[in-house]
Amino acid sequence: MATSEGLVAWSNAANQRQTYPYFLIDSAQHEGSYKWLEKWNIPYLSLFEGQREESLIEIAPLLIPLNQLDPIGLERLANWATELGLKSPCFSWMESSLPVDQLSAHLRNFHNVGLSDGQKMMLRWYDTRILPVWLACLEDKQLEQFTGSIFGLNFLNRFGDEVAAFESNEPSASSTPLPLGKPVVTLDDRQLGMLVDAGDLDTLLTHLRRVITDETNRLSQRVLYKFVGKYQQRAVEAGVTDIDRQSQYVLLALYTSGAGVEHPLCQELMADPPKELDEFFEKMQGLPVDAWESGPPLWPINS
């Protein structure tokens, strides 16, 4: 796990290497973060600058250069950023060969991505739930473009673990914007599917936390994420691609630690699942009691 002391040491080491250390905060998950930076007189640049979303500073990704901060300011910032990153997946840090104006211009080239149908899509790659999927889906040349001028990129994931996402002793050159606002990176359908799938899992998790709040609160994020992801994928493979029907299927799995979805009648249902939510819901609720009582719930019963 990253610590504020470790981040301060990393920043100081980057300064000694005569490179530029940065924090990046996705303030959509902590709205108004810029106000704290301004209160502490800490410089930052919004990656929304020059984009259609420029006025949305409350939720903008904020690039924070560290090389000019005094020790007290750097320690305060590192403590604050670490705390934010442990609360939600919003914090990453990087070392670059570029000063802040040039690095921010480079990163803004990836504000939008192109799609196979010629459309553009805004991509919040700095959300650290999306960042590892973004890096994994890129082809070699695209990854080289995105990581241009970057020696290292790290982040705190949704579990609070430190992840070293990228490292290079000789990074490629920074990206150059294309004419007429054309995206630097265009994703094919496979790449887009990887990003959509990552978003779908978070949507399902959010829905389940609202439906069975007390129960999901008894589980660690890591256990819940892994379990729900497994059974959501099984639902998708059966042709159940919408969140509402998936939630009915995954609820049965959660309430029985997975045993309920192995019941012969549930497997028969999933072999040809109804496409309409009402019919699917009725058939899931109509499964026999022994399907719903075939295993203990995933969460501790006596917590």
Image (spheres, grey):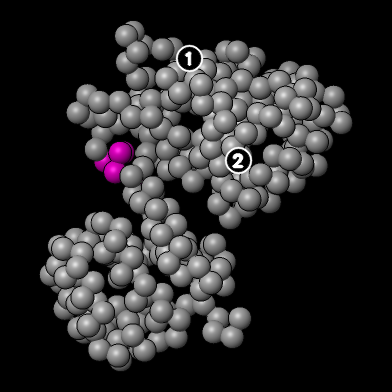
Give the mark nearer the N terminus: 1 vs 2: 2
Instruction: Choose top left, top right, bottom left or bottom right for residue 67.
Output: top right
Question: Considering only vertical position in the picture, is 216 above or below 290?
Answer: above
Residue 226 image position (x, y, % from top left): 45, 63
| Range drawn in magenta | 190-194
At horizontal 33% and vertical 85% (from top left) the residue drawn is 292
**Left or right, 96 with reference to 216:** right
Tally the marks.
2
| Disc 2: which residue | 30
Q: Is residue 204 left or right of residue 245?
A: right
Residue 68 locus on image (x, y percent): 78, 19
Residue at image position (54%, 84%) is: 301
Q: Is residue 10 above or below residue 254?
A: above
Residue at left offset 75%, top offset 46%: 3
152 vs 206, left or right, is right
For this rendering, which residue is in front, 117 or 53? 53
Q: Which mark is residue 143?
A: none
